[in-house]
Image (cartoon, coloured by chain):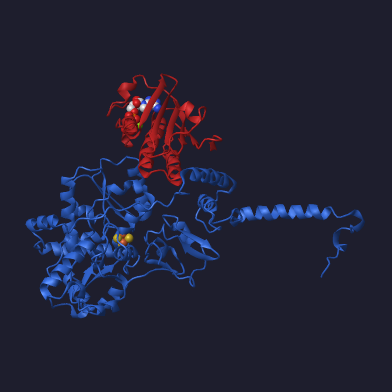
């Protein structure tokens, strides 16, 4: 591991050196060199686009395995709101939770419960702080990293509140400690993750020194283990389940529906997020109070580690939310409890998120300026086809790579062909310069010398 | 793109067409990316991004055609928006927040709040407008780089025409 931990990894044996991933990467973090993809770790934001794009399944996410549960005396599962969407309409939130318990956890703390509490915190923060607008949601770690590498000027727009995952982990551990008397380090808190970005957020968080989550297990793996327990889940332990609004966080628009205050805007899909953040950067969206932004199309139900089709999952969540609503549920926290939680600092993001500017061509400004000139000159000589055959996503990025000393102009097939053609012409010219005495008759009579 | 020999100034310049909303924002985006590649303080980049975009859009919305230019040096970024267009009859009125002559269809597109020029002023360290009714407008905005080395640009270098 270098400076950065990344959940997204490459299986070199499976990689065939096609260019699908380099074209889809939103931070231009991937190159194909010597027939294999290579990820620039300082640029990678773990959004998972390449996992989806790779036809050979050479890109995958490093996650914690269920075996890790045995490291702890007591374990708590933190199901993300998107988890509920993996189950058909015949399931209720309670049966889903019982099936999850069957996987081997001792208890469950529902992330949607924490999500609703975070919604309260967002409203409170919006009312108290008159800061730069729009405030940007901190819930999706891929978006936070995107802002670090591509929009550092927008870092202070990020609402300094923790994600529902972190909040639920803190509350879960506290509850388990109080209920069992087991010391906190022997309690294992595991997030059921829809994505690689959350794994990275657990292993190397931004905004805090250490995550309160002990591990992140792939939703596909947990789902596979949980379905077999569905049949025994009709009755059993009772849960005070999350509110419908909390479940809604699993899909795009759910977070804003929870906040329901001020001017709200929601965007999903990392490439769409980039277009909206570009607008914010131009100073055009100052009339928006809060921006929900999710890297995955459709929100977390579209996460790369989610087994169910996102459109089906969306309908499942809606059905489950309606079911919860019709039961007139009691909110998990009263207003006073929420206010006390807010004051306790459980929502507060304690550290500021540093920029990770990756575009800089040189540490020295003057030298970087010279490189920009060389870059533009180089680009003018490239064919501007953005074909990707050179292994860089665009002609401009190849020019950047050349200036950074990471590639050569002849990596461009068209430049190479030009060079070969020039060389051939030169050779022909040279060949014609042989002394007339040694010249041979032309045409088919010419016999090449074999030696 | 050209630079002045001996002086570390990088000049980028783009032609802007009036009413071409499809291409609008491209020039400012390209210059912004260059500022990031040069590695200027990101607060400077942020301020420049706003100034560039508003200046570009004012040409697109209010003028016939023009040029958006940035002169980048380790000390400062000079942004010049020079257009052929109707000019501004009353500059101090145009500088007021909320003043706009943008027609209804432009407002429909989310522009014409009368915030562009005041925002350029707010995000730059110096700003000047030269304008002649019936001919055109030239807006010059300067953003200083905090802690940038003292200005060593020799006289006669490009910033001379930025006044
Ligand atoms: N390049 C220009 N040529 C002619 N008139 C201009 C030019 N730039 C600004 N103006 C005039 O000044 C007014 C105020 O400009 P300003 O940029 O502050 O607001 P706006 O362009 O109308 O709206 P917004 O910038 O908020 O979209 C404009 O409505 C226009 O009348
Ligand atoms: S949208 Fe959700 S699933 Fe996708 S990267 Fe962000 S947090 Fe993960
Ligand atoms: Mg304007």
Q: Is residue B105 visible?
A: no
Q: Is residue A375 visible?
A: yes
Q: Is residue A104 above or below residue A85?
A: below
Q: Determine the residue located farthest toward the right in the rendered image.
A: A437
Q: Is residue A175 above or below residue B88?
A: below
Q: Position of residue A320 (x, y in %)?
A: 19, 65
Residue A26 placement: quadrant: bottom left
**Residue in the image at 16% along x and 77% along y:** A234
**Residue in the image at 57% along x and 44% along y:** A377
Q: Position of residue A100 (x, y in %)?
A: 22, 75
Q: Count up the numbered dots.
A: 0
- Which chain appears blue? A
Q: Is residue B78 above or below residue A168?
A: above
On the picture, is A184 further left or further right than A328? right
The front one of B67 and A347 is: A347
**Residue in the image at 50% along x and 55% along y:** A393
- Which chain appears red? B
Q: Position of residue B30 (x, y in %)?
A: 45, 42
User: Ligand 1 shows up in which quadrant of the image?
Assistant: top left
Residue B91 placement: quadrant: top left
On the picture, is B138 further left or further right than A68? right
Q: Position of residue A146 (x, y in %)?
A: 36, 54
Q: Indicate the quadrant containing the C terminus of chain B: top left, top right, bottom left or bottom right.
A: top left
Q: Is residue A180 above or below residue B106?
A: below
Residue A427 placement: quadrant: bottom right
């Amino acid at each position: 591991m270098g400076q950065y931990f990344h959940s997204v990894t490459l299986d070199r044996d499976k990689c065939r050196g096609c260019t699908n991933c380099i074209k889809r990467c939103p931070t231009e973090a991937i190159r194909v060199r010597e027939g294999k993809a290579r990820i620039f770790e300082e640029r990678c934001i773990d959004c998972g686009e390449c996992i989806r794009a790779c036809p050979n399944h050479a890109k995958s996410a490093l996650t914690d395995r269920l075996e890790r549960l045995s490291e702890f005396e007591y374990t708590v599962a933190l199901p993300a709101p998107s988890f509920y969407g993996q189950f058909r309409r015949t399931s209720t939130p309670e049966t889903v939770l019982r099936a999850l318990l069957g996987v081997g956890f001792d208890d469950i703390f529902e992330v949607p419960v924490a999500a609703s509490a975070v919604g309260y915190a967002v409203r409170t923060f919006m009312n108290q702080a008159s800061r730069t607008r729009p405030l940007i949601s901190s819930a999706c770690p891929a978006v936070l990293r995107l802002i670090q590498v591509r929009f550092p000027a927008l870092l202070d727009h990020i609402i300094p509140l923790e994600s529902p995952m972190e909040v639920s982990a803190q509350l879960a551990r506290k509850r388990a400690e109080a209920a069992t008397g087991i010391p906190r380090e022997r309690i294992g808190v595991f997030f059921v993750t829809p994505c690689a970005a959350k794994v990275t957020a657990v292993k190397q968080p931004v905004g805090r020194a250490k995550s309160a989550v002990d591990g992140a297990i792939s939703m596909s793996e947990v789902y596979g283990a949980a379905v077999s327990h569905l049949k025994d889940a009709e009755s059993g332990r009772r849960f005070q389940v999350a509110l419908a609004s909390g479940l809604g966080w699993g899909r795009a628009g759910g977070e804003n529906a929870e906040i329901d205050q001020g001017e709200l805007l929601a965007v999903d899909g990392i490439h769409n997020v980039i277009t909206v953040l570009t607008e914010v950067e131009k100073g055009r969206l100052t009339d928006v109070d809060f921006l929900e932004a999710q890297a995955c199309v459709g929100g977390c139900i579209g996460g790369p580690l989610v087994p169910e089709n996102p459109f089906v999952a969306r309908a499942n969540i809606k059905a489950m939310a309606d079911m919860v609503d019709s039961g007139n549920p009691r909110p998990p926290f009263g207003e006073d409890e929420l206010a006390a939680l807010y004051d306790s600092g459980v929502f507060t993001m304690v550290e500021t998120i540093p920029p990770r500017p990756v575009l800089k061509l040189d540490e020295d400004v003057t030298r970087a300026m010279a490189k920009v000139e060389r870059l533009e000159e180089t680009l003018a000589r490239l064919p501007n086809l953005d074909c990707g055959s050179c292994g860089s996503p665009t002609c401009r990025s190849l020019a950047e790579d050349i200036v950074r000393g990471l590639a050569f102009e002849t990596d461009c097939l068209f430049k190479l062909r030009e060079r070969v053609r020039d060389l051939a012409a030169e050779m022909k010219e040279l060949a014609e310069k042989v002394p007339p005495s040694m010249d041979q008759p032309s045409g088919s009579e010419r016999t090449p010398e074999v030696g | 793109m050209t630079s002045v020999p001996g002086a570390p100034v990088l000049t980028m310049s783009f032609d802007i067409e009036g009413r071409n909303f499809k291409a609008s924002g491209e020039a400012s985006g390209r210059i912004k990316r260059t500022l990031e590649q040069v590695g200027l303080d990101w607060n400077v980049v942020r301020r420049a991004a706003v100034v560039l975009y508003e200046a570009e859009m004012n040409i697109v919305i209010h003028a016939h055609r023009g040029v958006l230019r940035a002169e980048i040096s380790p000390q400062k970024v000079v942004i010049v928006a020079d257009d052929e267009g109707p000019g501004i009859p009353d500059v101090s009125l145009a500088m007021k927040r909320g003043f706009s002559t943008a027609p209804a269809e432009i407002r429909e597109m989310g522009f014409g709040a009368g915030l562009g020029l005041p925002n350029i002023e707010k995000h730059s360290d110096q700003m000047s407008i030269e304008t002649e009714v019936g001919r055109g407008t030239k807006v010059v905005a300067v953003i200083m780089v905090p802690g940038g080395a003292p200005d060593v640009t020799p006289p006669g270098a490009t910033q001379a025409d930025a006044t």
